[in-house]
């Protein structure tokens, strides 16, 4: 009677498991890096919003409204995608 090799204890499986672990760690590091980029952009946008998008209330024009409309549209695309709403709804 021959015994079967345990795939969890063979060197090939161990190498594959180590490669998977390195790949997951690299993916986690990349994910955290992108998350930090997004957090920084959100903080800058919040600061800009807190400062009324660098406009003075008495100097606002329709051009400023159009600019904010464009910002809102782009952010809506992002939130629709993130929350699976709008065009991204299932």
Image (tube, rainbow, N blue to C red):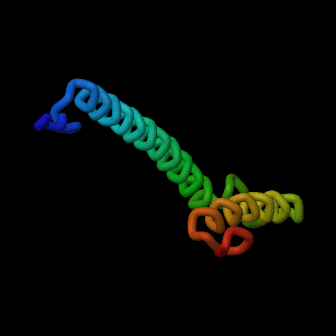
Residue 58 occupies quadrant = bottom right
Tell me the residue at 82%/65% (across/down).
65
Residue 52 occupies quadrant = bottom right
Whole-percent x, y for residue 30 in the image: 44, 36
User: Viewer-proximal residue, 80 or 11?
Assistant: 11
Q: Is residue 37 left or right of residue 5?
A: right
- The correct choice, above or below, for 33 with respect to 74 in the image is above
Whole-percent x, y for residue 38 in the image: 52, 47
Q: Is residue 33 left or right of residue 89?
A: left
Q: Is residue 4 left or right of residue 47?
A: left
Tell me the residue at 42%/38% (across/down).
27
User: Viewer-proximal residue, 71 or 33?
Assistant: 33
- The correct choice, above or below, for 39 with respect to 90 in the image is above
Which quarter of the figure is the C terminus placed in?
Answer: bottom right
- The correct choice, above or below, for 63 with respect to 28 in the image is below
Residue at the right extreme, as displayed: 62
Tell me the residue at 28%/26% (across/down).
12
């Amino acid at each position: 009677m021959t015994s079967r090799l345990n795939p969890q204890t063979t060197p090939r499986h161990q190498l594959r498991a180590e490669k998977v672990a390195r790949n997951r760690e690299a993916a986690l590091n990349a994910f955290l890096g992108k998350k930090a980029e997004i957090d920084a952009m959100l903080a800058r946008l919040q600061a800009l919003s807190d400062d009324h998008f660098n406009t003075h209330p008495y100097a606002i024009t329709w051009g400023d409204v159009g600019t904010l409309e464009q910002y809102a549209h782009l952010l809506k695309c992002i939130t629709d995608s993130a929350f699976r709403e709008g065009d991204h709804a299932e």
